[in-house]
Image (spheres, helix red, strand yellow):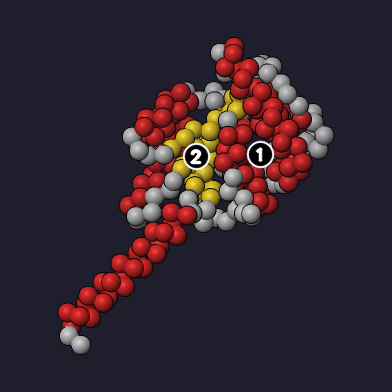
Amino acid sequence: MGSEDLFRKRKARESAELKRKQHIRAQNKRYLIVCEGTKTEPHYFRELLDDWGIRQQVVRVAPNDGVSPDRVVAHALHLYNEDAEGGDAYDKVYCIFDRDKHTTFSAAVQQTKDLSAGGKPLEAITSTPCFEFWLLLHFGYTDQPFHAAGKKSVGDQVVQALKAKDGFKQYGKGLKGIYTGLKGRLNEAVGNAEKLRSHCEATSSVNPATDIDKLIATLRSLKPE
């Protein structure tokens, strides 16, 4: 058999293998979650993914590279581009960050919208004032705004309210087991977040608010049969 025939057969095998991988890839979308928090949010989502049997190959929770919203988006974009250059870009990239008192919040949200419009599927998943408000919604509905008072920041006020709930007296950043302890109330939290969104749209309010329920809905759709 000539070298030309061997070359053609090798190329045919490579082409067939590429098509096979592309077919498999089309059936299995990949998602990336990049959090502002270094511990609390990553722990929460990793526990949820493990509980729902969603593999890391499907949803990756990446370490952050800076805690301000603009840094979260920049790092998420870097990770997206890195994968795209390898020929297998993420189908969706979620940037999780808080409004809190960040000066780059609005610009970061707008940047994700601009990037998405340009074909790079980044989406901001935000909470106002902070992620802990999402946890608070597991205990009931509230649309009462939070504000800084005295030496307590707006985020401190949410944490104080959370610590008043059963099982959260010792709450602190980086605490593990939060998802596990609250998963029985997850549907209640989702319902409360949806109700709050309707309230915010009707009143043009942005405090409090959260989009975490939107991400939860996406992840729920990825649960194995």
Residue beneath disc 1: 173
Q: Where does the N terminus fall, quadrant-wise?
A: bottom left
- Residue 169: x and y in percent read 79, 34
| Disc 1 residue crowd, few under 14, some 14–19, many 20+, Cα 10 Å | few
Camera-side residue: 124 or 117?
117
Query: Gap between marks 1 and 2, in whole Å?
Result: 21 Å
- Residue 45: x and y in percent read 61, 45
Q: As displayed, is residue 65 above or below residue 10?
A: above
Q: Is residue 173 visible?
A: yes
- Residue 205: x and y in percent read 58, 15
Q: Is residue 68 visible?
A: no
Q: Quadrant of residue 138?
A: top right
The label nearer to you, 1 versus 2, is 2
Q: Quadrant of residue 200?
A: top right
Q: Earlier in the sequence, mark 1 or mark 2?
A: 2
Which kind of residue does numbered mark 2 sit on?
Answer: Tyr
Label 1: which secondary element: loop
Image point (26%, 71%), residue name: 11
**The residue positioned farthest toward the top in the image shown:** 203
Q: Quadrant of residue 87?
A: bottom left
Camera-side residue: 67 or 28?
28
Residue beneath disc 2: 94
The answer to whether residue 173 is left or right of residue 111 is: right
Image point (69%, 46%), residue name: 176
